[in-house]
Image: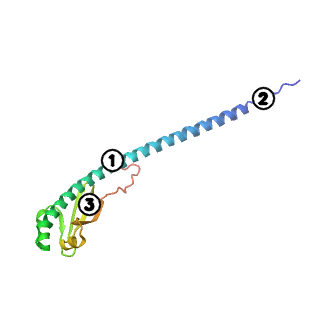
Amino acid sequence: MKKKNFSITNIGNVSLLMIFIILCMVTFAALSLSSAAADHRFSQKMADHSKEYYKASGQAETKLAEIDRILDIAYKGAESDDDYYQQIKDSLPEISQTFTKENPLISYQAEMNDSQAVFVKLRILSPTEIASNGSSSYYQIVAWKEINTKEWKGDNSIKLIGEE
């Protein structure tokens, strides 16, 4: 009887397949790890941004409460619309004011960081509007948004070989 010879190439094919599978698994593991690290960095940046925004928003709310108190005092002590607006102008000199009879506006901002702020714009209601609406609010919020306070300068340069 003849003995059967087993080919060694069958063992080589299995070994190559195992090496290929292991390389694929290592590659996918490395990609997953780098993706998870990038997601973690992004979520940390978003958490920091949210903290800054809510801190600035809290400062804006505090300023709004102060403005509301000043408007209440001015409304109760004013004899006319002109007197009301004059008392507001005198009480809020540090805030940007644009007063016209038709559209009296107050705006201010609370800094978030060195390049962003929360911007608030209020329309002051006239004493006749307040009395006719029966409202306890002296203002209407026109804008409450995040703004950039610095101009963005993108780097569009391309570094070529040999450039310093």
Front tag of 1 and 2 = 1
Q: Which residue is mark 2?
A: 6
> Is residue 162 shown above or below 29?
below
Q: Nearer the viewer, residue 116 or 155?
A: 116
Would you name the residue on which mark 1 appears?
A: 48
Q: Amino acid at mark 2?
A: Phe
Residue found at the far top of this picture: 1
Per the image, the residue denoted by label 3 is 119
| Vertical position of residue 139 compared to residue 11: above or below | below
Question: Which residue sits furthest front?
Answer: 134
Q: Residue at x 44, y 42 (%)?
A: 37
Residue type, label 3: Phe
Q: Residues within 10 Å of mark 1 (few under 14, many from 20)?
A: few
Type of amino acid at the residue the image marks with label 1: Asp
**Cβ–Cβ under 8 Å for marks 3 and 2:** no
**Residue at image x 54%, y 40%?**
27
Marks 3 and 2 sit apart, C-alpha to C-alpha, by 81 Å
